[in-house]
Image (cartoon, rainbow, N blue to C red):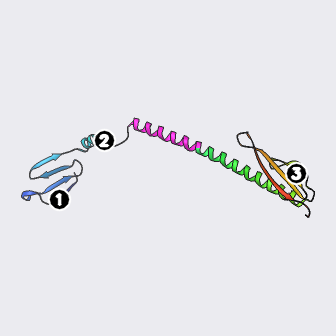
Amino acid sequence: MLRSKLPEGIGGSPRFVSLRHKIYTTCGKQRVDSMKDSKLTNQSGLTLLEVMIAMVIMSISLLLLLNMAMVALDGNDWSNKTTIATQLMQEKLEQLRNNPTPGSGGDTALGVVRNWTVTNAGSHLRQVGIDVTWEDIGGNMVTDSLSTFIKTGSV
């Protein structure tokens, strides 16, 4: 049996501690606590119910995170399509501004349908309306429009 000698106890008797059975000897009194007894009284761990509750909480939180990810992807797609549509409207407006005799028309570019109308609003002044339409990730048609005046020729 492994023993380690501790400092002397009361009355000069040595104190020994058994590493195997935790035997403490002090002044002729002994207290025995076996390791098996200490394991029974010191129960540490998780019950099956606690593990199941933790799994339910984790599952719900992961489902909520998945939903947030899907909303973020939808938002990114909408933002991307809106940026493309705005750039296409700006591009067409610049083309019409640089054309001395702008006319109405329509075309499709990058999955976005562009329609524009040019009407005479006075001498050397034209009103331009540009509409763009695209399909979002949910299959809904989204429309955006721009309306402005451009000066043509000299006054």
In three-dimensional space, the C-alpha distance between marks 1 and 2, rounded to whole angstroms, equals 29 Å
Kindly identify the amino acid type of the residue bearing the numbered disc 3. Answer: Val
Mark 2 and 3 residues: CB-CB less than 8 Å, in contact?
A: no
- Disc 2 is placed on an element classified as loop
Q: Which residue is rendered at x = 14% and y = 55% of the image?
A: 15
Q: Tell me, yes or no, whether the highlighted magenta stretch contains residue 66.
A: yes
State the mark number for residue 118.
3
- Quarter of the figure with the C terminus: bottom right
Judge by depth and name the residue closer to the eye, 102 or 61.
102
Read off the residue under disc 1.
6
Kindly identify the amino acid type of the residue bearing the numbered disc 1. Answer: Leu
Judge by depth and name the residue closer to the eye, 18 or 122.
122
Q: Based on the displayed image, in which of its 4 quarters is residue 51 positioned?
A: top left
Which residue is at the far top? Answer: 49
Q: Is residue 38 left or right of residue 155?
A: left
Q: Which residue is rendered at x = 21% and y = 49% of the image?
A: 22
Which residue is at the far left? Answer: 11
- Disc 3 is placed on an element classified as strand
Q: Is residue 122 visible?
A: yes
Read off the residue under disc 2.
43
Q: Is residue 142 left or right of residue 154?
A: left
Q: Which residues are magenta?
A: 43-67
Mark 1 and 2 residues: CB-CB less than 8 Å, in contact?
A: no
Q: Tell me, yes or no, whether the highlighted magenta stretch contains residue 119.
A: no
- Sequence-first tag of 1 and 3: 1
- Disc 1 is placed on an element classified as strand
In three-dimensional space, the C-alpha distance between marks 2 and 3, rounded to whole angstroms, equals 83 Å
